C-alpha cells in the first residue's frame, strides 16, 4: 500500500505545531498502525530527519500508552487501541491524518506525545482503597456477590489511555473518573472511603482543568475497553449521595 | 570470536550468607526475627530508590512508604500504571487450598522447585509458597476484582498442567488488575508525599560509593536532562531482559539497562541463559513485525496442534485430509499430548518447522485447531471459554479461528535469569536489591505458569520490605552523599559521555536495525535449542556487531530533548553486551535444563537431560570489562526436601 | 452542601438538571393551559383569571402566580448561569480543535448551547409580548389574553419566532430530559431505552401542543 500521512509535528511543549505531510510506500495490510509509523521513522532517521515521536509500549492493547487521533477519531476507526489497529482498515492511496490527544489538561510534549499525568493525580486523590500491606483480612472473610464483582471488573478494565478525554468535545475525564469510582465503590472493601473517594476524585478532575459532561457519548464510543456511558450516571449518583452524606456530617 | 571471552575464569563460590538453616518452613520466620529493625521514627530519614513500577516495584514502593521510608521512584513510562506486568493474562498462584483439592504450601513449593528443573533455591521457593497466601488477602483488600463464584467466594482454576486449582484470576487480565492494585496503593503514598515519583525518567547508571549502592543516574526523557539521585539503598525492579531477542512478548520499551549497568558496577548476573519460550504466540507476519503477542496457553486444553505430514505442503488447512496431518505432540507424547510443558511444546514446534513442515508465511508456524473442540462442545461453548482470545487472534491476523485453524509459534516470554541475589534479595553490591523478574531467584531454569505475578508481589509487598530493614539498620551511613561527591560526578560524566558519543557517530544505520540484527542472531543460536557450534558462532559475531554499532549508529536530534531514538540506541548498547554473556552462559552449561536446551544433552527420546553432578549450581557472573571474559562464581544448590528427578512426559 | 454542589462541575450539572425539570413541569402545565384557546375566548380568559386567584382565600390575589414566577425566575437564572459557567469550562478544556473533523453526536446534543440561548431570548420576547405587553403588536389588553394571543399570531414574525423557538424547545427537551436523568443518577442500562422514549414523547408532545396555538390561529380554527 502507498499512503499519504499528515502528521502533527511539534518540536516541544512551547513550540508551535503544524501538520506535515509524508508519503509511505510498501505498507503491508498485516502491519499494525504503529508498525507503519515505525517504517516511516526508520526512513526519517536515515534521511537525517527527526522521527515522529509517539507513546507506545506493550503493543497488545493493555498498557494504555498509545494515544493517536487518527482521521479525527481517538485510536482510529476500529474500537480498539491504536496498537491493535491494523493497516487492513485502510486502502491503498488513502490520506491519513494523525494528531495528538487534544485537551488543555493534556499538554503536548512533542509531536504526538502528550502529558497525561492529570489522570494519575485523579487516582492519587482517592482512586484507591486504603489497605496497607499486612493489614489485610483473610480473602474469604468478605464474600462479594458475583454481580457486584462483575460490575467492579467491568469498570476496572479501564487502561487509562485517555481516549475518552481526547474524544470528548469538552475534554472531560468523566468516563475515566467514573470507571475507577464505580470499580471501588461497589466493593465492600471500598465502602469506608466511598464518599470521600468520589468527592475528592471529582474535585481533582475539576482542578486539573478537564471539562464537564454533556453526555454526548463520544467517550464511550471511543473507549477501547467498552466502559459504558452509564458509568458516568452511576458516578453522578454516587456523587450526589456523597454530597448529601457529607452535608449531614 | 575473541578467544579471551570464552576463556572465563572460575572464581570463589558465591554463598548466600543470609539464608537461614533449619526446617524449610521455619526459615522465613527465623530470618524475619533475626533481621534488625529500623526505629519507625528514623525511617523517614532513610531514602530508598526504587527503579520500576511493575508488580514488584509498585508494591515495594507503596509498602516501603507505608512503613515510613522516604521513597524516590522511577519509571520510563508516562505513568506508573503501565509497566509490562499489566500484560500478564493467566493468573496468580496461591496455596490457599480453597478447593480442598489437596493443595498446600508444601505442594506449591514442590511444584515450583520441580517445574524449575531443580535449579532454584529451596529456601526462596518455600518462602514464595508461604507468602502466596498473604498476597491474595492483600490484593482482595485493595479491591482487585478477582473472578468470583455465585456464592461470592473467589474462583480458581487449574493452570499450566498443574493438578490442583490454585490459580486466582481476573478474566484474562489478571496482571492488569494486580498491577492497578499496586499502582493505586502507590498513588496513595504519592499523594501523601511519601513517594517522590519520577515518571518518564530512565535509570542509566548506578552510583556505588565505598562498595555500597548509593544512588543512580537517570535521564528525564522529556527534557533530556541527566540527573543524579542519592539514597541509602537502591532497589531495582526493572523487569527482565527478553527484549535482547528483539522480537518477544515484552513491551517495546522494556529493557535491560538498569540491571546491566548494575552488573557492570559489580552486581553478579546469574543464569543469564535461562529464558522461557512460550509456545502459543501469534506468528510473525513479516519483517515489519515489532513485537509478538502471546495467547493464553489454556488454548492447548482444547486445541489440537498439527502440521502437514509432507514438507512444503502449501495447501490451505481445510484441504489437507486427516491422514495427511501430523498431530505431532499427540504422536510423540501420547500421555500428555497437547498439554506437554511449555519448553517441550516450543521445541517440538521448532523441530517440525525446521523440517520444512511449518505453515503460514515464512513457514514459521503450526496449526492449533479447534475444529474437533467445536464439533464436540459446540461453537457456543468454545466461544464462552475462549471468545476473547479468538477475538484477539482475529484482530491481529484477520483470520477467523472458528473457521480456519489458528497458527501459533513460540516466542520469548520471560527470563528466569537476572541479578544474583541472596535470601534478602540483596545483590552482591551491598545496598543494591533486585526484585521481581530483575532477579534470578525463584524460578530456576523454568517458570511455572501464573508464578511470575506471585513472585513479583511476594518480593515487593512482603520480602523486600522486611529484609531491607536489616541492611539499613546494620549499615548506617555515616557520611551523607551529595550530588557534588566526586564519585557521583564521575558516574554522571560517564553517562553523559556515552550519550554524547551515540549522538556524535552520525553513521548510516538505525538503532532498530542493530537491535534486530542481534535479536535474530540470539533467536537462532541462543533460542529454543542451543549447540556448542551455534553459540560459538554467536559469540564470534556479537563483538563484530558491537564494533559496527559504534561505527555506524545514527541517532538524530540532541540529548537535550525528548528523543526516542537516543533512548533506543542506549538500550541497544547494553543488549549488545548482555547478549554475549547469555551466549557464554549457555555455552558453559553443557547440560539441558528447563528453558535451556543443549542439543548435545538429551535423552534417547529427545528430552532435556540434566547433569546434576556437574551443574547443580547457579552461575553468577562477575563483570570484568566489555568483551573480556567474565568470572564465574558458582552457588551450589542443595536439595534437602525435593529430590531431583528427570522429567518424563512420554 | 450548597458550596460543594456549586463548586463542582458535577454539582453544577445537578443544578441544571433540577432547574430544567422544574421548568419542564411548568411547561407541561403551561401547554395544557394554552390548549384551552381552542375552547373559545371565555374559557381561555376565565382560565387566565383563575391563575391569579389560585389558593384564595389562603393566598391573596396573584400571590400564587408570583410565587410560581419567582420559582421560575430562580430556575431560569440558575439554569442559565450554570450553563454559561459550565460551557466556559468546557471550551477552555478543549481549546485546540482537531484538524480532521468528523461528524459528532446527535443534533439535539450539539444544539444544546445555541438552543438554550435561543430559548432564553424567546422567553424575554414572550414576556414582553404577552405578559407585560411592551412589544405587543396592536393594543395589549390586560385581562384579555385570548385577544392578545390572536394579535401576536396574526403577525408573520410572531409565528416565525414562536414556531422556531418551540422546535428548539423540542430538541432541548429531547436531550435535556434524558441528560438530567443521567445527571441525577436515575439512568441505568435497563432503563435507558425507556428514558429516551419518555424524552422523545415529552419533546414531541410539548412542541406539538405549543405549536398548535399559532397553527390554530393561522388556519382560522381559533379566531
Image: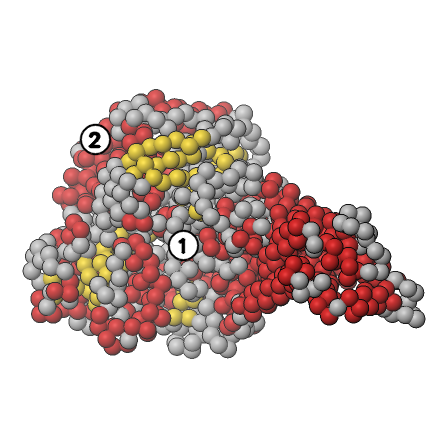
Query: In the figure, is residue C61 to the left or right of B216?
Result: right
Disc 2/disc 1 C-alpha distance (Å):
45 Å
Query: Residue B289 occupies which quadrant of the picture?
Result: top left
Q: In this rendered view, identify the residue nearer to me: B617 or C54.
A: C54
Q: In this rendered view, identify the residue nearer to me: B576 or C4.
A: C4
Query: In the figure, is residue C137 to the left or right of B323?
Result: right
As drawn, B402 above or below A200: below
| Percent x, y of residue A83 | 37, 48
Q: In this rendered view, identify the residue nearer to me: B300 or C47.
A: C47
Chain assignment, label 1: A
Give the SS element for disc 2: helix
Q: Residue under label 2, please give it.
A: B544
Q: How many marks?
A: 2
Task: State which mark lies toward you, 2 or 1.
Answer: 1
Chain assignment, label 2: B
From this viewpoint, is residue A201 visible?
Answer: no
| Percent x, y of residue A246 | 73, 59
Give the SS element for disc 1: loop
- Residue at (82% x, 68% y) in the render: C46
Query: In the figure, is residue B20 to the left or right of C115?
Result: left
- Residue at (53% x, 34% y) in the render: B230
Evaluate if marks 2 and 1 touch, with contact meaning CB atoms under 8 Å apart. Answer: no
| Percent x, y of residue B228 | 50, 31
> In which quadrant will I find the N terminus of chain A?
top left
- Residue at (39% x, 50% y) in the render: A77
> In which quadrant will I find the C terminus of chain A?
bottom right
- Residue at (32% x, 56% y) in the render: B395
Crowdedness near tag 1: few (<14), some (14–19) or many (≥20) residues, C-alpha within 10 Å: some
| Percent x, y of residue A184 | 57, 61
Q: Residue under label 1, please give it.
A: A79
Amino acid at each position: 500500500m502507498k499512503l499519504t500521512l499528515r502528521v502533527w509535528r511539534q518540536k516541544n511543549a512551547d513550540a508551535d505545531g503544524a501538520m506535515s505531510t509524508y508519503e509511505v510506500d510498501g505498507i503491508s495490510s498485516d502491519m499494525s498502525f504503529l508498525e507503519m509509523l515505525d517504517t516511516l521513522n526508520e526512513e526519517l532517521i536515515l534521511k537525517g530527519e527527526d522521527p515522529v515521536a509517539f507513546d507506545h509500549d506493550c503493543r497488545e492493547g493493555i498498557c494504555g500508552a498509545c494515544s493517536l487521533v487518527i482521521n479525527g477519531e481517538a485510536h482510529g476507526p476500529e474500537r480498539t487501541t491504536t496498537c491493535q489497529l491494523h493497516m487492513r482498515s485502510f486502502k491503498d492511496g488513502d490520506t491519513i491524518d494523525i494528531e495528538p490527544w487534544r485537551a488543555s489538561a493534556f499538554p503536548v510534549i512533542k509531536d504526538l506525545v502528550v502529558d497525561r499525568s492529570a489522570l494519575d493525580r485523579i487516582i492519587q486523590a482517592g482512586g484507591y482503597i486504603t489497605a496497607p500491606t499486612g493489614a489485610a483480612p483473610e480473602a474469604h472473610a468478605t464474600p462479594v456477590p458475583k454481580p457486584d464483582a462483575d460490575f467492579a471488573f467491568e469498570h476496572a478494565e479501564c487502561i487509562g489511555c485517555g481516549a475518552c478525554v481526547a474524544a470528548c468535545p469538552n475534554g472531560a475525564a468523566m468516563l475515566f473518573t467514573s470507571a475507577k469510582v464505580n470499580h471501588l465503590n461497589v466493593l465492600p472493601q471500598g465502602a469506608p472511603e466511598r464518599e470521600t473517594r468520589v468527592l475528592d476524585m471529582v474535585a481533582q478532575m475539576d482542578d486539573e482543568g478537564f471539562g464537564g459532561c454533556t453526555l454526548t457519548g463520544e467517550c464511550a464510543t471511543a473507549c477501547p475497553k467498552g466502559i459504558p456511558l452509564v458509568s458516568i450516571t452511576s458516578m453522578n449518583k454516587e456523587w450526589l449521595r456523597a454530597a448529601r452524606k457529607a452535608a449531614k456530617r | 570470536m575473541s578467544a579471551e571471552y570464552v576463556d572465563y575464569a572460575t572464581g570463589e563460590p558465591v554463598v548466600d550468607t543470609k539464608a537461614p538453616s533449619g526446617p524449610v518452613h521455619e526459615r522465613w520466620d527465623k530470618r524475619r526475627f533475626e533481621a534488625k529493625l529500623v526505629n519507625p521514627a528514623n525511617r523517614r530519614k532513610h531514602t530508598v530508590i526504587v527503579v520500576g513500577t511493575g508488580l514488584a516495584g509498585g508494591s515495594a514502593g507503596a509498602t516501603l512508604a507505608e512503613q515510613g521510608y522516604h521513597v524516590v521512584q522511577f519509571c520510563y513510562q508516562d505513568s506508573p500504571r503501565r509497566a509490562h506486568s499489566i500484560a500478564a493474562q493467566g493468573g496468580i498462584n496461591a496455596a490457599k487450598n480453597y478447593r480442598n483439592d489437596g493443595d498446600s504450601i508444601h505442594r506449591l513449593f514442590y511444584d515450583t522447585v520441580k517445574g524449575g528443573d531443580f535449579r532454584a533455591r529451596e529456601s526462596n521457593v518455600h518462602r514464595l509458597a508461604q507468602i502466596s497466601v498473604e498476597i491474595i488477602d492483600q490484593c482482595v483488600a485493595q479491591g482487585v476484582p478477582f473472578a468470583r463464584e455465585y456464592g461470592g467466594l473467589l474462583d480458581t482454576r487449574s493452570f499450566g498442567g498443574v493438578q490442583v486449582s490454585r490459580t486466582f484470576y481476573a478474566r484474562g487480565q489478571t496482571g492488569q488488575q494486580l498491577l492497578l492494585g499496586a499502582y493505586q496503593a502507590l498513588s496513595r503514598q504519592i499523594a501523601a508525599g511519601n513517594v517522590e515519583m519520577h515518571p518518564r525518567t530512565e535509570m542509566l547508571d548506578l552510583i556505588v560509593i565505598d562498595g555500597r549502592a548509593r544512588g543512580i543516574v537517570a535521564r528525564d526523557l522529556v527534557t533530556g536532562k541527566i540527573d543524579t539521585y542519592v539514597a541509602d539503598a537502591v532497589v531495582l525492579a526493572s523487569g527482565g531482559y527478553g527484549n535482547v531477542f528483539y522480537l518477544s512478548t515484552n513491551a517495546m520499551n522494556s529493557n535491560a539497562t538498569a540491571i546491566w549497568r548494575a552488573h557492570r558496577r559489580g552486581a553478579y548476573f546469574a543464569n543469564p541463559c535461562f529464558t522461557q519460550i512460550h509456545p502459543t504466540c501469534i506468528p510473525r507476519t513479516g519483517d515489519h513485525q515489532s513485537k509478538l503477542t502471546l495467547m493464553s496457553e489454556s488454548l492447548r486444553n482444547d486445541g489440537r496442534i498439527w502440521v502437514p505430514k509432507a514438507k512444503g505442503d502449501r495447501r490451505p488447512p481445510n484441504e489437507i485430509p486427516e491422514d495427511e496431518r501430523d498431530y505431532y505432540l499427540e504422536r510423540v507424547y501420547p500421555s500428555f499430548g497437547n498439554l506437554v510443558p511449555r519448553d517441550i511444546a516450543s521445541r517440538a514446534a521448532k523441530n517440525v518447522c525446521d523440517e520444512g513442515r511449518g505453515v503460514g508465511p515464512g513457514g514459521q508456524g503450526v496449526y492449533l485447531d479447534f475444529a474437533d473442540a467445536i464439533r464436540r462442545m459446540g461453537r457456543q461453548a468454545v466461544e464462552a471459554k475462549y471468545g476473547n482470545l479468538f477475538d484477539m487472534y482475529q484482530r491481529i491476523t484477520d483470520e477467523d479461528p472458528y473457521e480456519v485453524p489458528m497458527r501459533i509459534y513460540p516466542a520469548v516470554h520471560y527470563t528466569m535469569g537476572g541479578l544474583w541475589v541472596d535470601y534478602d534479595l540483596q545483590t552482591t553490591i551491598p545496598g543494591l536489591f533486585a526484585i521481581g523478574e530483575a532477579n534470578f531467584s525463584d524460578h530456576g531454569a523454568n517458570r511455572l505458569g501464573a508464578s511470575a505475578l506471585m513472585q513479583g508481589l511476594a518480593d515487593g509487598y512482603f520480602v523486600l520490605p522486611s529484609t531491607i530493614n536489616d541492611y539499613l539498620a546494620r549499615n548506617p551511613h555515616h557520611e551523607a552523599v551529595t550530588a557534588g561527591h566526586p564519585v557521583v560526578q564521575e558516574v554522571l560524566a560517564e553517562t553523559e559521555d556515552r550519550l554524547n558519543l551515540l549522538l556524535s557517530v552520525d553513521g548510516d544505520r538505525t538503532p532498530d536495525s542493530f537491535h534486530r540484527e542481534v535479536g535474530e542472531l540470539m533467536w537462532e543460536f541462543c533460542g529454543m535449542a542451543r549447540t556448542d557450534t551455534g553459540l560459538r558462532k554467536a559469540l564470534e559475531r556479537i563483538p563484530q556487531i558491537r564494533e559496527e554499532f559504534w561505527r555506524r549508529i545514527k541517532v538524530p536530534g540532541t540529548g537535550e530533548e525528548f528523543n526516542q531514538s537516543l533512548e533506543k540506541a542506549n538500550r541497544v548498547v547494553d543488549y549488545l553486551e548482555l547478549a554475549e554473556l547469555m551466549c557464554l552462559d549457555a555455552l558453559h552449561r553443557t547440560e539441558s535444563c528447563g528453558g535451556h536446551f543443549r542439543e548435545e544433552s538429551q535423552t534417547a527420546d529427545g528430552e532435556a537431560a540434566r547433569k546434576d553432578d556437574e551443574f547443580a549450581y547457579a552461575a553468577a557472573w562477575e563483570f570484568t570489562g566489555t568483551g573480556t571474559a567474565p568470572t564465574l562464581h558458582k552457588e551450589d544448590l542443595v536439595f534437602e526436601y525435593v529430590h531431583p528427578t528427570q522429567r518424563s512426559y512420554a | 452542601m450548597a458550596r460543594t454542589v456549586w463548586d463542582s462541575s458535577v454539582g453544577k450539572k445537578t443544578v441544571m438538571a433540577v432547574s430544567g425539570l422544574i421548568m419542564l413541569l411548568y411547561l407541561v402545565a403551561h401547554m395544557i393551559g394554552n390548549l384551552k384557546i381552542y375552547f373559545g375566548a371565555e374559557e381561555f380568559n376565565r382560565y387566565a383569571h383563575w391563575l391569579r386567584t389560585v389558593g384564595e382565600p389562603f393566598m391573596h390575589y396573584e400571590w400564587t402566580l408570583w410565587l410560581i414566577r419567582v420559582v421560575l425566575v430562580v430556575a431560569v437564572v440558575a439554569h442559565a448561569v450554570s450553563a454559561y459557567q459550565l460551557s466556559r469550562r468546557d471550551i477552555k478544556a478543549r481549546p485546540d480543535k482537531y484538524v480532521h473533523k468528523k461528524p459528532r453526536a446527535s443534533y439535539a446534543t450539539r444544539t444544546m448551547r445555541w438552543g438554550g440561548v435561543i430559548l432564553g431570548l424567546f422567553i424575554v420576547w414572550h414576556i414582553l409580548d404577552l405578559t407585560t405587553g411592551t412589544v405587543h403588536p396592536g393594543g395589549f389588553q390586560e385581562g384579555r389574553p385570548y385577544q392578545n394571543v390572536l394579535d401576536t399570531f396574526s403577525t408573520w414574525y410572531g409565528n416565525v419566532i414562536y414556531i422556531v423557538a418551540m422546535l428548539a424547545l423540542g430538541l432541548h427537551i429531547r436531550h435535556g430530559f434524558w441528560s438530567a436523568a443521567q445527571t441525577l443518577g436515575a439512568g441505568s442500562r435497563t432503563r435507558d431505552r425507556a428514558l429516551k422514549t419518555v424524552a422523545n414523547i415529552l419533546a414531541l408532545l410539548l412542541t406539538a401542543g405549543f405549536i398548535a396555538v399559532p397553527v390554530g390561529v393561522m388556519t382560522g380554527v381559533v379566531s
